[in-house]
Amino acid sequence: MNLAFDSRPASELSGVARYTRCLLHELRSCLTVDITETHKPRAHVADLYHAPWLAGAMLHPPLPMVVTVHDASSLHLSSELTRGGMRLRLRYLAVERALRVICTTTAAAEQTIDRLGLSVDQVVVIPEAADPVFSPRGTKAVAAARRRFSLPERYLLWVGDLTSAMHRRSITAIAHAHRQLPLVLVGPGDRWARSFSNVVTTGEVSDDDLAAIYTGAHALMFPGDGNGFGLTAIEALACGTPVVGYDTPATAEVLGERAELVPAGQVDALLEAAHAAVRPQVPVAPEWTWSAVAAATCEVYQAALDHCESLPAVRPSIRRGRDHDRQPSARV
C-alpha cells in the first residue's frame, strides 16, 4: 500500500502533533505501508491519503481519503456565516467526502455522525495512547525540573494550549478560585496568565521536562468539556500522577475509574478533588499502545481501499454511502 500522509502538524506542540508523530513513527514499522509525507497527494504516487487533522481534509481529494477528527465540539459553528465559520464549514464538507473518518472517542464519533450525516460504516473509533517517553521520573530529574522552571515543592498542574479561548475560561475560573496549592500551567501562550496570583507558567517544555513535571505534580487538573481524547490526562497517569476532571462523556469514556471526576463546571468540587488526591504507587495509564493504534489504523486504510474498489468508477470524493444510523461502526 502506498500512503500519502499529511505530516504538517508533527512539528507543533499539541495533542494533534503528538498523534501525528507517534502514529507516523509506528506506521513506518509496518512493512505493508510505504509512506510519502505530503498534503498534496497525487493519484499516480499513492493509493490512499490520510489527513491526521481537520485542516488537511481536501474538498476534492484526487484519491481515496481518510481523515482523523480529534474533537467535534466545533461542529455547531459550521453553519455560522462568519469568515471563520465558513472556513470551518468547508473543512467539514471535506470530511464528509472521506471514505473513512477516524475519531479518537465514541463521543466525538457520535457527534460527527449526527452533525454531518455520515454513514456508520464511515466512522471508526481508535483511541490514542501515551508516548513511551512518559513514565515516572526519579527524584533527581524532578528536582532538576523544579529548579529549571522555578516550581514549588507541591503544585497542581494543567497542561495544554493556553491560546485556546475555551482553555482560558477554565483556567481563569481555577486561578480565581480558592486554592490550597499553587497552580502550574504548561503550554504555549502563557503571557496572559502571568498576572494571576499563586500561578506559575513554564511556556513550552521538552518531553523529558514534561514527564518530570507530571511526576512532581500533586495532581493534574483536566477540566475538559469537549469530546476529544484528552491525551495529557493519559500522559499524567503514565507518570503515576493522579488526574481529576469533569465528568463529561468523552472524559468518562477515556479515563473511567482511573481518574476522579466531578460534575462539569463545578470548579470548587474540582479543586477539592485535586487537593484530596493521593499519588498512586504505580502508573495506571491504559495499556493501549501506539503500536496498537497504528495496527487499527492500517485496518481502516485497507477497509477504505476495499470499499473504493467495490464502487463504480466515479470520483473518490463522492464515493460514500449515506445512511443515517446514529451509532459509530466500531469501537477499538
Image (spheres, rainbow, N blue to C red):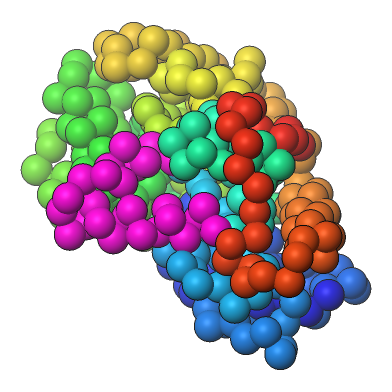
Nearer to me, 80 or 253: 80
Residue at screen point 67% across, 84% down: 43
**Main SS of residues in magenta:** helix
Task: Name the foreground residue: 310 vs 120.
Answer: 310
Residue at screen point 33% across, 53% down: 89
**Picture quarter containing residue 156?**
top left
Is residue 90 in the magenta section?
yes
Is residue 241 in view from this perspective? Answer: no
- Counting every numbered tag in the picture gives 0
Rendered location of residue 93, percent (x, y) = 43, 56
Q: Residue furthest left?
A: 195
Vertical arrangement, residue 252 with respect to residue 35, above or below: above
Q: Is residue 248 magenta?
A: no
Q: Position of residue 1 (x, y in %)?
A: 83, 75
The quarter of the image holding the C terminus is top right
Residue 62, horizontal then vertical, whole percent:
59, 78
In this view of the protein, can residue 325 be seen by the observer?
yes
Examine the image and state in which quarter residue 18 appears: bottom right
| Horizontal side of residue 44 vs 209, given as left or right | right
Task: Name the residue at 60% across, 43% down.
Answer: 322
> What stretch of residues is rendered in magenta?
72-97
Q: Residue at x 40, y 33 (%)?
A: 226
Q: Nearer the viewer, residue 100 or 254?
A: 100
Q: Position of residue 101 (x, y in %)?
A: 61, 50
